[in-house]
Amino acid sequence: HVDQMARCAELLADEARFDFLDLNCGCPIDLVYNKGMGSALLERPARLEDLVRATHRVAPQPITVKVRPSQPASQPANN
């Protein structure tokens, strides 16, 4: 979904004022994790890099990446 992330970032950059974009890679919820997002991205660093690079190409603001080091990515939370 790299293209979708880039389109959303571009829309935000064009239509809103903000200081930075935060990519949430700390979400351990199984519904998010099982779709390959949230904390699952930590197990796929090339994919995470693709998301950050695509976002950076269209939005000049800094990008942060939220992580939760206390929650192992391989053990998603059931919710």
Image: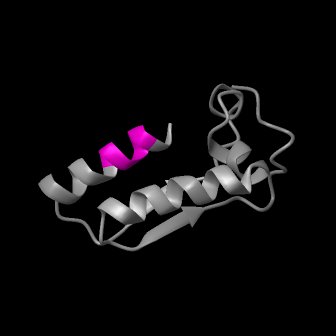
- Residue 35 in percent (x, y) is at 65, 28
Q: Is residue 62 shown above or below 73?
A: below
- Left or right: 10 as drawn, with respect to 66: left
Q: Is residue 43 magenta?
A: no
* Bounds of the magenta segment: 3-8
Q: Is residue 5 magenta?
A: yes
- Left or right: 18 as drawn, with respect to 66: left
Residue lying at 76% horizontally and 27% vertically, measured from the top left: 78
Q: Is residue 36 shown above or below 43?
A: above
The quarter of the displayed image where residue 50 is located: bottom right
Q: Residue furthest left?
A: 15
Residue lying at 62% horizontally and 54% vertically, measured from the top left: 48
- Residue 72 in percent (x, y) is at 84, 50
Residue lying at 40% horizontally and 65% vertically, measured from the top left: 56
Instruction: In this rendered view, identify the residue nearer to me: 75 or 15.
Output: 15
Report the quarter where the C terminus lies.
top right
Colouring scheme applied when the structure was drawn: one colour
Residue lying at 37% horizontally and 49% vertically, measured from the top left: 6
- Residue 22 in percent (x, y) is at 45, 60
